[in-house]
Image (tube, coloured by chain):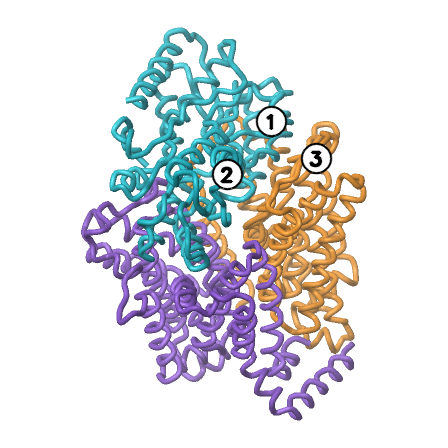
Amino acid sequence: MFYKTALATSVMMLSAGLVQAEQTYRIGITQNNVGVDSYQTTYESAFENAADELDNVDVVVLDAGGDVARQIGQVRNLIQQRVDAIIIWPTNGQAVIPTIRQAHRAGIPVVVTNSKIAEAGLDYIAAFSGPDNVQQGASSAEMMCEALDGEGQIVQIAGQPGYTTAMERSKGFEDRLAEACPDVEILETQPADWNREKAQRVMENFLTKYDDIDGVYAGDDNMGVGALNAAKSAGRAGDIAFIGATNFAVGYEAIERGEYYGSIYQSPVDDAEAALQTALDVLEGKEVPKMNFFETPKITADNLAEFDKPVF
Amino acid sequence: MIDMKRFMSGGAAIQPIWIFVIAITVFFSVMSDYFLSVGNLTNILVQTSTIGLIALGMTYVMINGNIDLSVGATLGLAASLSVGLQDHGLVVAVLAAITAGVVLGALNGLLVWKTGVNAFIVTLGAMIGVRGLIFVYTEEQSFYASNFAFSDFGASAIGPIPVLAIIFLACTLVMHLVLKKTGHGRNTFAVGGNPEAALDAGIRIGRNMMINFMIVGFFAALAGVLLATQMGASTPNLGRDYELWTITAVVLGGTKLTGGFGSITGTLGGVLAIGILRNGMNMMQVPAFYVLVILGVILISVLIIDQKINVKSSKGVQA
Amino acid sequence: MASAEHIKQGFMLSKTHKAGLLNFLSAQGILVFFLICMLAFSLFSEQFLSQSNIMTVVRQASIIGIIAVGVTVVIIGGNLDLSVGSMLSFATVLVVDLHDKIGPVGAILVMFALTLMLGAVNGFLVGFMRLNSLIVTLAMLSAIQGLVLIYSGGQNVDIANQSETWFSVFGQGYLLGIAVPVIIFALLAVIVQVVMSFTGYGRRIFAIGGNPVAAVYSGIRKNWCVFSTYLTSAFCVACAALVLGSRVMGSQNNVGQGYELLVLAGIILGGTSLLGGAGSIWKTVIGVLILGFIQNGLLLLGYPYYTQWLVTWVIIILAVWLDLANKRKRLLTRHS
């Protein structure tokens, strides 16, 4: 229910923008790596759909293919084309700062979406719009405490090394876990690059190495389901609580079946629409807070019915 | 020697890749209003300078009949060193980065020379291993330069032309002259064209190869440092797949993988072709998925056309 | 410089002539090396030689291994295939996506047919058009990745009712206590090894890889032989996709990314020369297993995952160097 309301609100917000606007805006977006997972792909189409519904917005949609250097080039191209605003989904929270600074100097407002940039760059952006990944990690830690009654041994499967979202979720999780239930011990952390098959392999190795695993925290559901698959083949899934983030359809179904303890509900549609709306607000001269987090609630078997199944 | 001259003069006629470069330039100028502006053209030069610099060195290595797959990893290591060591001073950091590139090149060259192991294998090993070195050094972290002086250099310009573009063009000119006018350049052709004859002519083959590996290592490191100045930062994954695009650019430029034939002018054309295609397709908003297919198809087409031209011109020579 | 090489060459020759044991060791270097690695790891980690760990490693290595069997044939024929990574993504996405749409049998058939077609494109361009295989398959690596994304629209694909389909057998099933992926890997390896060693077809592949000109003069239809090696490679990729898709019961679009390098690393470790005309499937099998066990062993010992890359570098150089010591004479004349 929450999600539906949120969507309705954002659609209303968008149409409100439509009525007010008189000028046509060209907004350029450079995304991280479309096609690498469904979240990013759904984000892209949601962004294009949202822009299509507005008569006064033209968008230039680019994709960096995960390559920092290519993203820098794309921002330069957008500056060159004199777009009115640039939305950037950073391939790396540090490396894009100088190019964001160049856009800032050229008088083009920059909105950072989905994944934060480092503090040194905050002066040069108009706003950030996206999920609070540290908070998400903390929420997952709280669910882990609940699931294990505050005691046990767990393993962590992290996202792509060096990528801000992965680092923030890990940090949020580890800090909150130590605080909320110090008796839950993280045995080991390995990255699986947001890849389900890799997570499956990593989990198989964990299962051989450790006879006693009570919980798994995965940086997203795609990897979490990979870990679940591995545990199921080893016949140990029943003893382990699986907790993820960025609820995928497969994760939603696994919660439904009772195999997966919980996750964080994060909609790429909300994410995309929030980014576009933030950029429009900036262009229309509205007062916009620097950090715009959209809500990403916990999702477990208890409140599953309140959410639509993710489309990705 | 006479054969050599014929090879060189063959490069004087306009190369097929340049016809292609001109064709796509015209095409994108018609298709996009923004394409043919000074700003965009210098953008293309800056964006191609990374692959372009590596390709200069790669051309030498490939004329030698070798290949270097480790350049992407070397670039990543140099970038990380040039940012990570800035506490010791900018000069130290940059020197360390460049030295690392040259040393890794020397190591590759030495292994190819002394062990006789195929360059593809030696550098494939290095490609995997040097990436490991980066991760050991950085512990998976991205580094960033604490002051903006470093990244200001990457964004600076002399007149309308960005410094990075000037560095790239200057290096291209030097490498062109070295290949055409010096003994080292002639030896490079001889070693790749006919090793036995080169040996008989008293050319020190192993040394020549090793120097060329050091050259490509140097350029990979330089490209890494310059890329780091554009970002004011480095990431451990920087440079992934760059070896593939570099080799592609060099081959597009007409350099033969079998060795003994190639030119810096052709390589420049190859690098520009890829840069212009990417930039132009961005301008036309071709979806990223299609860009991959189009690049692949164009590469194969150019290969086929190039082969047809060569078969015509060298009929009877190839048994 | 030339004389130095000659002296070195003489030194190498006398050494190999004298020491019979050393000769044997260097001939079987990779096998010896494999055993030393296994021994070393088992000293430091109790779990390393446990049955469940060994089964896990072999099962994980089998996907790379299955592809490596096919690529080895391409390499023996004197060419390279770098497109297998994208091709694996293509085949896996296809078979998983079609599973729910047209049923498992149809999905498997269509997947094999289309993957073989991609192999045929490679084979046509390299075998008949005589284009350089490195560049052709590099271009195909990019083009096929694009095709996958266009086909799926960039979305992950999943099999809906995972518990109700027999499709899971390829990746998750067991036969007589042995994991099905391992059985597929072993079967393919044995069949291809037998074909390469004991049939005229196998001998022809060795001939065109070793000395293409002589092979053509002796009446071998080189075009078709090269073409067929790429079909073999594509067939193996399709088998690997069957295992991968069934193991995960879903697929991302970049699932095969980087596999081409792992496959090559395994083949090189096994000691198959990239010059063509030499090599064997069983060596590749050992090379792939070494990679798998090193990765697993280092992780069990608690080293970070990236140390395996450094170790792989050193081992590749040492293994190939050791292997070459045996064939020193031939290579010196070739390279000096």
Colour seen for chain B: orange
Whole-Å distance between the Cαs marked 2 and 3? 36 Å
What crowding class fits label 1: few (fewer than 14 Cα within 10 Å), some (14-19), or many (20 or more)? many
Q: Are marks 2 and 3 in contact (CB under 8 Å)?
A: no
Q: Do labels 1 and 2 share a chain?
A: yes
Q: Which comes sooner in the sequence, label 1 or label 2?
A: 1
Please state the chain letter of the residue tagged with numbered disc 3 in the rendered image: B
Q: Do the residues labelled 1 and 3 touch (CB within 8 Å)?
A: no
Residue A158 visible, this angle: yes
- Vertical order, A237 against B113 (above or below): above
User: Of the residues shown, which amino acid type is indicated by label 2?
Assistant: Pro
Q: Residue A100 carries which label?
A: 1
Colour seen for chain C: purple
Say what secondary structure mark 2 lies in: loop
Q: Which of B177 and C313 is in front in this view?
A: C313
Residue designated by label 2: A182
User: Of the residues shown, which amino acid type is indicated by label 1?
Assistant: Ile
| Disc 1 versus disc 3: nearer the observer | 3
Q: What residue is shown at x 59% (from left), y 51% (from top)?
A: B246
Whole-Å distance between the Cαs marked 1 and 3? 15 Å
Say what secondary structure mark 3 lies in: loop
Q: Where is residue A26 in the image (x, y as percent from the top left)?
A: 47, 19
Q: Position of residue A159 (x, y in %)?
A: 48, 43
Please state the chain letter of the residue tagged with numbered disc 2 in the rendered image: A
Q: Residue B145 carries which label?
A: 3
